[in-house]
Image: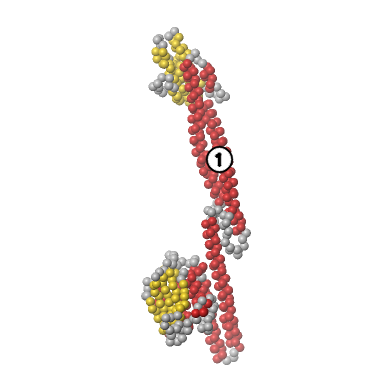
Amino acid sequence: MSSRPSAPSLRRQLLLWLLIPLILILAVNSVLAYRVALKTANDAYDRLLLTSVRAVAERVGVTDGEITVDLPYVALELFESNIKEHIYYKVSGPGGKTITGYEDLPPPPAKPAVSDQPVFYQAQYQGGTLYLAALYKQIYDPEVHGSVLIQVGETAESREALSRQILIDGLVRQGLLIAVAALVVWFGLQRGLEPLLRLRDGIARRSPTDLTPIDDSHIQDEVKPLIHAINLHTARVNSLIAARQRFIADASHQLRMPLAVLKTQAEYGLRQQSQAPVQAVLDDMRSTTDQTTRLVNQLLTLARAEPSALAVEELALVDLASLARATASEWVPAARRKRIDLGYDGEEGGLSLGGNPLLLRELIANLIDNAIRYTPPEGRVTVRVAAADKSIVLEVEDNGPGIPEAERERVFERFYRGKTASAEGSGLGLAIVQDICRSHQATVALAEPVAGHGLIVRVRFPRAVTVTSG
């Protein structure tokens, strides 16, 4: 079984993000620094070459019609250093004849247009690269006409040593600066991560039942949205846990009584000797079992109707008019057994909203069940669905005893049973309706019919309920 590789730590990521740009900067800077160092060394030694060439040119003269050179060796000593390099020179007359120096020294590539303008060039000589400076000096003498070419060259050892030294010194200084900058950034990074590390330690020390919000007062602004999202998620988890705890408490409280009744009825039946009392006990046990089954189903519906539980489910587009009409049809047999006129009055369809189809069906069924349960025989129950402004209104009206105005708020409490409550009721019907309404951003209200007595339960759904496609 392959394990998913773990993500690198934030500290390691930040360190990589810091080192990689620094390495790239150092590499690019090394190339640029090498070019600068090479140009600096070339410029310095080209000036020395030019100084030597001019010094030699000043000692060129004409004696008895011949060009003479009093070579100043001091000019060639300018290149003396600890590095074993070679110096070459050559002085050529107007016809190209060598007056003094190395006869095979390569000439400049071209003669400058202006006299006394130096020429710097490179050439291959004796198996190596030679850097040369050349100068054409015009001779002004009645017996000699033309110009004298003075050349001085050196090998590359000194230039390479100087450029290498300049490069190393520059890189050392820049490396020290980068190292100091990296240390400063690392120190700042450590200080910046301290609040996150304290947050990590604080969360790690929490008990499993501690779902209080995380304090973000000492956290960087960039991290606060993450803390806010964690707090929202924790609040949803806390709400789900609280809903489950309420469900467990309600279920244990309400199931204790019918189970005790079933046990008593069974014990009573076992003590009977004749068939008739046993049959009566069995009938009572069946009735108690039906009531207990209905109670369990209502408790499960109540748990599912919690707004916090529905928040994690996907909603669908539901035609409320068609759903109400179909649900009313399902309750027609129950209404007929009690001789109640159950009817639907409203649109046939086309009134859609976003919601959970099963819970919306349960809401309508609970309203119809309550109306049939509390309406006397020969009574009337009407289901209506209509559009109103930006909402859809569902109404269930009956002509039963109604609910006193003083009790209309309390009837939505779980297990509350008013004075007109049925003996078979559990007190969960309207509580389930209210929870389903809350989970669908709807409102529920109780009212009296305009004419006569009875009760109207009016549920108003907003059309703009978020729908998530599956």
Mark 1 residue element? helix
Q: Is residue 1 visible?
A: no
Q: Quadrant of the C terminus?
A: bottom left
**Foreground of the two, 236 or 98:** 236
| Way the structure is coloured | secondary structure
Q: For the point 45% across and 78% down, which residue is it?
A: 447
**How many numbered markers are drawn?**
1
Q: Is residue 110 positioned above or below 276 on the image?
A: above
Quadrant housing residue 198: bottom right
What residue do we see at 42% from left, 75% from top? 394
- Please give left or right for residue 446 compared with residue 245 in the image: left
Q: Residues within 10 Å of mark 1 (few under 14, many from 20)?
A: some
151 shown above or below 406: above
In percent of the image, x 48 and y 14: which residue is there?
59
Q: Is residue 243 visible?
A: yes
Q: x, y percentage for residue 105? A: 46, 20
Of 51 and 409, nearer the camera is 409
| Residue extending farthest top | 64
Locate residue 238, reporting x and y percent: 56, 66
Residue with the mark numbered 1: 178
Left or right side of 204 for 151:
left
Residue situated in front as seen by the camera: 188 or 48 = 188
Percent coordinates x, y for residue 182 in the rendering: 57, 43
Please name the amino acid that badge 1 sits on. Answer: Ile
Instruction: Return the x and y of residue 56 as percentages of the image width and height.
Output: 48, 17
At x 60%, y 63%, the residue is: 210
In the picture, which quadrant includes the N terminus? bottom right
